[in-house]
Image (tube, helix red, strand yellow):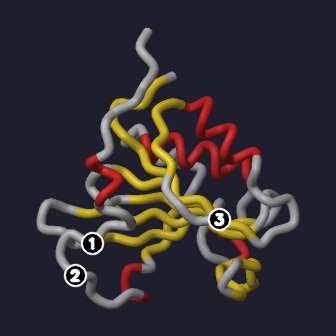
Amino acid sequence: MPFPGKVLLHPANGGVIFLYDWEIVLSRLSYFANKGPDFIVFELKDGSYVQCAGSKNQLTIETRTYDSERNFKHLTWGRSICTGVKTGIESMDGYIEVDTSQVLQMRDARIIIKAFIEREEIPQKYLSTASTFSFGPLPPDKRLNHKAWDWPDRRPKK
């Protein structure tokens, strides 16, 4: 099923890939490392993104959304309210400290990524914790990759 707009993929091995439907997203997620560390970022035109880090069986999912004034909200997703017990998820930059309720699996990532890309509400079985305060201010209109948004739309013609 095609997306309503462009989506950029930023894979762990670098570069940028333009995505236009769920078959490609699911294909790219199937390459996510079984034992980690790995990460993947899906970026929307306004600079908002959803990212996963870890492995298929232990990963963390974060979203960042922007309002019209370029203020952002950064959220970490979990299955329940925070337990207060911390654990580490292995990433390419070391360990990411998260609450044990925020250790998710690839099946969770697919659900959250789909809702995020389609600009739908994340299902209520997932709870978010604001982590915006962990980041300093970003320059105006900061995106992961500006030039990619100027690429022509190469969706296959039906």
Q: Where's residue 132, x and y in %?
A: 38, 80
Which is more N-terminal, label 2 or label 3? 3
Residue depicted at 71% across the width and 61% down the height: 104
Position of the C terminus, as image quadrant, is top left
Q: Position of residue 15 (x, y in %)?
A: 53, 60
Amino acid type of the residue tagged 2 in the rendering? Pro
- The answer to whether 14 is drawn above or below residue 158 in the figure is below
Asked where in the image residue 5 lies, by quadrant, the reply is top left
Q: Are there few (<14), some (14-19), or many (20+) residues within 10 Å of tag 2?
A: few
Q: Secondary structure at mark 1?
A: loop
In this view, which residue lies farthest toward the top?
158
Residue 82 visible somewhere in the drawing: yes
Give the answer, above or below, for where 104 lies relative to 98.
above
SS at mark 3 in the image? loop
Residue 13: numbered disc? 3
**Residue 6 lies in what quarter of the image?**
top left
What is the distance, in whole Å, between disc 2 and disc 1 at their CAs? Answer: 6 Å
Give x and y (percent) for residue 110: 63, 44
Query: Disc 2, disc 1: CB below 8 Å?
Result: yes
Where is residue 100 shown, x and y percent of the image? 73, 76
- In the image, what residue type sits under mark 1? Lys
Kind of residue sitting beneath label 3: Asn
Residue bearing the label numbered 2 = 139
Residue at image point 56% right, 32% down: 22
Taking the spot 57% from the left edge, 55% from the top edge, the residue there is 126
Q: CA distance from mark 3 to mark 2?
A: 25 Å
Q: Secondary structure at mark 2?
A: loop
Image side of residue 156 versus residue 70, left or right: right
Q: Residue tagged by mark 1? A: 142
